[in-house]
Amino acid sequence: MMFFLRNRRVSTHQKSVIPSGTWRIFAEGGAEGSATAFRLSAALSFTLIFLAPLAAPAQAHFDGARAYEYAREFVGIGPRWPTSPGHAKAEAFLRDHFQRDHDQLEEDTFTADTPIGSVPMCNLIVRFPGTKPGIIVLGTHYETNYPLRNINFVGANDGGSTTGLLLGVADRLRDEAGHAPGKKLQGYSVWLVFFDGEEAIQSWSRSDSTYGSRHLAAKWGRDGTLNQIKAFLLADMIGDKDLDIQRESNSTGWLVSLVSDAAKKLGYQRYFFQQSMAVEDDHLPFVERGVPSIDIIDLDYGPNNSYHHTAQDTMDKISAHSLTIDGDVFMETIRLIDQR
């Protein structure tokens, strides 16, 4: 079935789940077999006792519960469409959060030419320096939809969940860098970008949408920053309790494969890329300038997508479990990019 959302072309396909394998244990019969089994058991126990200290500890899961709490606080601001009091509060929320943690924060303010006239907007960029030359960018948008300003649209999934996700990623990056001043990540620098103006002001078009990402991609193209970006990962609408992240066909092929590898390694493959679609989103201004980019998005939100861009996009529709999956895959993808 083919259908369109916000000029977004969607193709639905049958979901598939890969079953896990099963271990089987065989034992010999009789007294001789029992003795053999005892010797093998003793030898195995000895081996496990002495080799266990050599095993590397499992990587801790991303703290999806904390990311959910960040999202809840952020969404509690209420609607945050450009020019609204809520929009100013959303900016202040993010600014205060990163200033409190003494992160490298840049406020990229600009004026957008929109169907309602000139509108002040602000992208927020948070930098976590690394030991290798090059940058991995993780992005989301944080504002809500201007045409929906009269229906109490709070965008819990659409902008809220991924803002909470990136705040949780920031916590993880601080931990990995050791929190001390001057400490760096072991690998590429990671920059978090909170885009303004992804949503249309009047109706979706290439000129009335993605204001923040178009502005920043052009700015970074002029100052040479784009040449340093190894990968750009965009997160959009992936807090959905019923997580089903589509394969976005405008995204860079090798980066799609890398995210797929990360999901498979972590046992999350059933949540990723069971459907395919083309999406117009904040990654396109970077794709068009040759930056390896991927849009990690779940546009199947509610029965027949009935929650998308409605007042039903509320916190009860998203989950800490989905944010844990997202965060685990994002952090593993960063690790895989560092290894390339």
Image: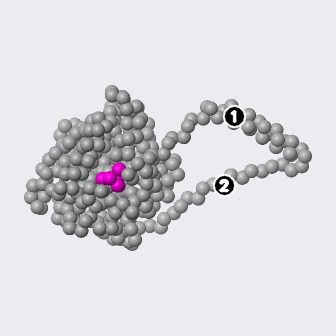
Q: Is residue 3 magenta?
A: no
Residue wearing tag 1: 49
Of callouts 2 and 1, the N-terminal one: 2
Magenta stretch in the rendered image: 70-74
165 to 19, vertically: above or below: above
Residue flagged by tag 2: what amino acid is it? Answer: Thr
Q: What residue do we see at 37% from left, 32% from top? A: 179
**Residue 237: where, in percent of width, then height?**
35, 58
Q: Quadrant of the C terminus?
A: top left
**Residue 187: where, in percent of width, then height?**
39, 33
The crowd level at tag 1 (other Cα within 10 Å; few <14, some 14-19, many 20+) is few
Q: Is residue 61 visible?
A: yes
Q: Is residue 71 magenta?
A: yes
Q: What residue do we see at 64% from left, 34% from top? A: 52
Residue 239, by quadrant, is bottom left
Q: Main secondary structure of the magenta part?
A: helix
Q: Is residue 339 left or right of residue 161?
A: right
Residue 148, by quadrant, is bottom left
Between 188 and 182, the residue placed more toward the observer is 182
Q: Is residue 122 left or right of residue 41?
A: left
Scheme of image coloration:
one colour
Q: Closer to us: mark 2 or mark 1? A: 1
Between 81 and 85, the residue placed more toward the observer is 85
Per the image, label 2 sits on a secondary structure element best described as: loop
Label placed on residue 22: 2
Most extreme residue toward the top, as rendered? 182
**Residue 122: where, in percent of width, then height?**
19, 48
Residue flagged by tag 1: what amino acid is it? Answer: Ile
Most extreme residue toward the left, as rendered? 117
69 to 127, vertically: above or below: below
